[in-house]
Amino acid sequence: MKIRTRFAPSPTGLLHIGNARAALFNYLYARHHGGEFVLRIEDTDRERSTQHAVDVIFDGLKWMGLDWDGEPVFQSTRQARHAEVVQQLLEKGQAYRCYSTPEELAAMREKARAEKRPPRYDGTWRDRDPSEAPEGAPFAIRLKAPQEGETIIHDHVQGDVRVANSEMDDLILLRSDGTPTYLLAVVVDDHDMEITHVMRGDDHLTNTFRQAMIYRAMGWDLPEFAHLPLIHGPDGAKLSKRHGAQSVVDFREAGFLPEALDNYLLRLGWGHGDAEVLSREEQIKLFDFDGIGQSPSRMDYVKLTHLNGIWMRQADDERLTNDVMERLAKHDDVELTETVRKRILTLMPGLKERAKTLIELSDNAAFAGLRLPLSLTPKAEKILDENGRTVLRGISEKLATLEPFTAENIDTALRSYAQEHDLKLGAVAQPLRAAMTGTTTSPGIDLTLLALGKDEVLARIRSVLES
Ligand code: GLU
C-alpha cells in the first residue's frame, strides 16, 4: 500500500502554526515512508474563502520547504461528485430527505435544552414515509446514522477513542441549497484521493466519529488517524494574538528562518530522545507516530528564538545577506548599493554570531549602509571625547598607508598603535567602532574595518573629526 497523506486547509484566514505543524507532520510521515503528500484546499465556504488566503497557504508551505506532490485539489470543484455520493447513500437507504423547517429545528433545540439534553436532531423524517413529504418544500439530506452500538477510532496518538452511537444524531450531508457539508466533502475527497493516513488537530476528533459513519455507510475503508494535541500559549491558554506571532507569515516577518520554525514545530509535539536540532534529512529519517506526545504543547517563543540563533549561525552568508538587504529596504536612511551588499556579506560571519533573529541581524548590519555623518548614540558620543578623537587621528594615519588592507594587517596596525601609545587594544578599538557604527557594538573591529574598506573607514573617521 502506498502511503498518502494530505494537508487540507480551509483558505479562510492565515496559515496558523497549528495547521503548519499538521502539514509538517503529514509531509514527514509521507516522506519517511516513501509515500506521497498531497494538498487539498477546502474552499467550499465560498463566502469566507479568499484567493489571498490560498496564496498565503501556497507561499507558506513553499517557504517552509513542504513541497506537495501533484496539483492541489480545490474542494469546490468536486461538488458534483459529493452530490453523487449522497445520491448513492439515498439509494442504499443510508440517507434520507429531511423536510424539517428552520423553525422546527430551532424548536427541537429549545426543547432539548429545556430537558437538559444535548441539542440533537430528533429523527422526525428518519422513519417517515417519503410520500408524506410536503409538495415542493426544500429539504436537506441526512445520514441515517446507526443508533446502537459504538463507534471506535483507533487513533495513533490518542489510542482507542469511542463514542456511543446513541450520542450522535443524523448529520446533514447535503444542505437544502444542494451544497455538501464539510463532513461529507472531506470523506469523499479523502476516499477518492486515496488518503491512507489523516493527521490533524484533535479539535477534529468529534468530526472523525461522524465521518467514520459516512465511510461505513458507503462501505469504504477508513484511513488511519492521528489526532494531534493543540498548541497552547506559554501560559497554557489557547494560543491567541496576545501571546505573539501565530501565523507562518507573522513568524517570517518576525525574522525566523523556515528551518528553525520547522525544527521548533516538530519538536513541539514530537520527540526523539534528546535530539533538539534536526536537519530535514534527520527529520524524515526519524519521524513516526511513536514520538508524538498526547498532551497539548506550550508555545515557547524564547526556545524558538534560541533555536533560530543556532540555525542562523549555520545558514549561508549570501542567503542571510539577501534577506538583510530586503529588510533594510524599509529603512530610509540606509543606502542599498552593491557596495553596501558586499560590506554586509563580509561582515556576515561576525554578525550572525550575535543575532538571534533576522530583524536583529539586519538592525546590526544597517550601519554598513548609513550615510555620513552618522548619528551617534550617547555612549558612542562619550567614547568620541578628546582622547577618542586623538586615537582616531593617529590611527587614521596608520590605516591610510596600510597595503594591502587585510584583516591581518589591520589587526597588526591597531596593536602596534596601542603598544606605541601604551593603550589597551580596547582603547583603540572603541573609538574606531563608535566612528564606524555610531554605536558601541559591532562584529570584531578588524572585520568591521575590512568590510567597510579603507576609503570608507577614513571617510567615517574624517566625518567624526570634522563634526
Ligand atoms: N479544512 C479543515 C481545517 O482547516 C481541515 C480538515 C481536515 O484536516 O480534515 O480545519
Image: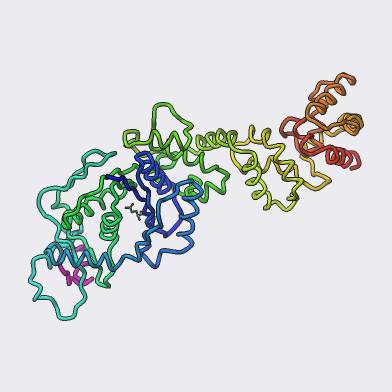
What quarter of the picture does the C terminus occupy? top right
Q: Is residue 344 visible?
A: yes
Q: Position of residue 11 (x, y in %)?
A: 42, 59
Check residue 102 for magenta coloring. Answer: yes
In this view, the residue farthest toward the bottom is 135
Look at 86% across and 40% down and name the residue there: 455
Of residue 288 and residue 137, the one placed in the foreground of this image is 288
Give the left or right position of residue 28, taking residue 452 as reference: left
Examine the image and state in which quarter residue 432 appears: top right
What quarter of the picture does the N terminus occupy? top left
Height in image: 250 above or below 32? below
Height in image: 69 above or below 277? below
Ligand 1 located in image quadrant: bottom left
Q: Can residue 116 be seen in this view?
A: no
Look at 65% across and 42% down and name the residue there: 318
Q: Position of residue 74 (x, y in %)?
A: 37, 62
Residue segment shown in magenta: 96-109
Examine the image and state in which quarter residue 101 appears: bottom left
